[in-house]
Amino acid sequence: MAALARWCVRHRLVAVLLWLLAFGGVSAAAAVTGSAYSNDYEAPGTQSGRAMQLLQEGFPGFGGDSDTVVWHTTSGTVRAADVEQTMTETLDKIADLPGIASVASPYDGQGTGRISADGHTAYATVTFDDRAEDIKKPEAEAVVHTAEAARADGLQVELGGSAVALTESAGGHLAEVVGVVVAAAVLFLAFGSLAASMLPIATALVSVGTAYGAIVLLGHAMTVADFAPMLGMLIGLGVGIDYALFIVTRHRRGLKRGLSVTEAVTGAVATTGRAVVFAGATVCIALLGMLILRLSFLNGVAIAACLTVVLTVAASVTLLPALLTFIGPRALSRRERRHLEEHGPQPELPTGFAHRWSAFVERHPKVLGIVALVVMTVLALPTLSLHLGTSDQGNDPKSSTTRQAYDLLGDGFGPGVNGPLTVVTRVDGAEDKLALDNLDATIRTTEGVASVTPVTYDTGGDTAYFTIVPESAPQSQKTSDLVDRLRTEVLPRAETGTSLDLHVGGVTASYDDFADVIVGKLPLFVGVVIGLGCLLLLLAFRSIGIPVKAAAMNVAAVAAAFGVVVAIFQWGWGSELLGLGRAGPIEPFLPVIMVSVLFGLSMDYQVFLVSRMYEEWLETGDNRRAVRVGLAETSRVINSAAVIMISVFLAFVLSGDRVIAMFGIALASAVALDAFVLRTLLVPALMHMLGGANWWLPRWLDQRLPRISIEPPEARAAHERLAAATDAEVADVLAKGQEEDVRDTSG
């Protein structure tokens, strides 16, 4: 790391130009190729996946996205001559637009079912040529603008569907701007130097901008969800600014001790830079753990987020040292530079609240540990009611046209019309057709079914499907129960004595199947992520206790963050006030992505906190001093980093995207709890209670483990001296540490 830092310092202009060239080149390539995102939630081998496959094979034109135009009259009916004329002309204009396959109007001979019983609401189905992920935004906008032009006094026109959702105005780049501004303010307050506070921002923006363009290009090579770039930007800005903050803080400490700019930069990268690389590696490992689920949808998200983290780490240890060299002593404030000139270099000792808090934790570890456990337990309780399911357009903000269309359809035709189920099967002969015809009456009398459409056959009569409209909304547990009832009771009886193989598809069925696949693999996934993270900590800190505590803390942070998400999004505590729509279930893919990201991020503070304690432990062999000094010296920078990361994450609530808002609130909650409850309270309290046992590792295991190092070379030399001791001497050190734990008081 020191050699890399020296190269970046000597060739600082080259380092900066290489990053700018990468940023410009990737961004230009992304602009030329355009995006190709795909939200493919299908899980291989499921019933809903098989149903979609049969539909596409038997009805090639069925694969296009179907959206709805809904209109509602406050006085009179939709059958009034002026309303019918206006909407018929509007639907004809939509049918002539590019990218439109067909428009099914309620005013033609077969459209009577698209007019509500009270005559005040009607809807038309607009089918595109392509699936939602392949529809260009201008095509969808043309449909929206044409339909909205028909609005008049007494005639409300709204639109719903996946393609229409592409046109919904989001927060644009407001979220990123707000997050960056708040981060800049916190950095300026922490450093007192405008130049130093701008460098972490600049480093993060260049690396995240490069990653954003790379994710756009990645979408052409593999399945990448449309929220992956925003998720990558959310993670990248948070960790990128934080990583740079840690390195700049160490650099400033070196300048205050009288080191030259080159020596301070090199020392910061050689020490804190190691921790940054290690922390970034843990985040990447946690993200890449999603690959073991073997779901193409999550593979793209994992690669995209990991790519962002890799670029932020690379920029922190290459671009940042070069920029620090350019600003020279101005990394310190004017007052700090003047004090250095007048009084000479002085060691930076922890003072003020950080010092007092560290001593307070040392004196009351048991009480504070219990308080922290109670807080985390209470916040984690809502996680027990976590419900994975379909979060549909009924959860959009009230002002959106998709939400209003959803509500109009639900009020006029029943909530189930927003998420019908599709039953598909192969047909072989007259007996199968007769069984399908007889099935209609059975389905109609099934509990939870509102209506059933007639069976439709393909041109060859080999494939058939019919649609079931549930009585309940797509996201309702009752609809999921209906899917189970159809699959386990109703349809198997209908298949008896025939060659029918009936598959239930549709929005709710596909999300339920996706959730079942994820939940089934979740234990393996969590075990692999935790296991690899613990292995890295074991290799870095040569201790069994440190990785075990880290795993427990990370699980606690994840559980508590899930509790906050459930309370806001599933229970609806304040979701409407935040502009996030009404309460609804949690998307099936969120737990996996959140576990990966939260586990990786929570390891960051563990690494930065414990690495400083480890340095002190290697120098003195005094656990109480190591914990006290480590907490006192890192708590301020950890708290500043946490405030920055929380601000960046919460700013993404302004994005207008429910999924991104979930990520933002979950990550902000986890970081807040991790920094202010776990790392500065529970972890040091436990380490004080465990004493020298924190650093215990069986000698036979120590000899067999490969060595990776976070600490600087001088600390490694101290570690080698300790490792050279006999088993008896190690036991004496541990015993002595435990005795001092009882008698010592903080200085």
Image (cartoon, rainbow, N blue to C red):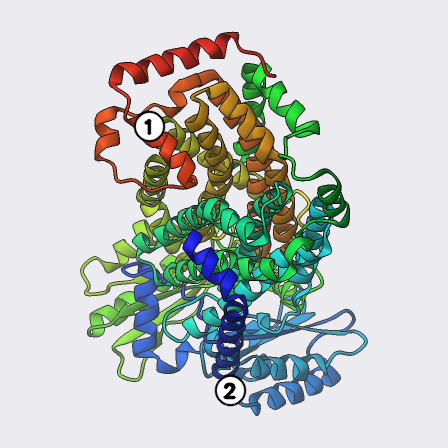
Q: Residue furthest right?
A: 153
Q: Which residue is drawn at 50% across and 47% down?
A: 267
The percent coordinates of residue 127 (x first, y second) are 50, 80
Give the quadrant of residue 296: bottom left
Q: Which residue is label 1 attached to?
A: 721
In-front residue for pair 558/446: 558
- Around disc 1, counting alpha carbons within 10 Å, would you say few (fewer than 14), some (14 to 19), or many (20 or more)? few
Above or below, 623 relative to 4 = above
Q: Which residue is label 2 attached to?
A: 99
Q: Residue at x 55, y 58 (%)?
A: 320
Number of numbered discs visible in the structure rendering: 2
Give the quadrant of residue 405: bottom right
Determine the CA span between mark 1 and mark 2: 73 Å
The percent coordinates of residue 663 (x first, y second) are 55, 52
Q: Regarding mark 1 in the picture, which secondary structure is present there? A: helix
> Which residue type carries mark 2?
Gly
Dot label at residue 6: none
In-front residue for pair 223/311: 311
Above or below, 218 relative to 271 = below
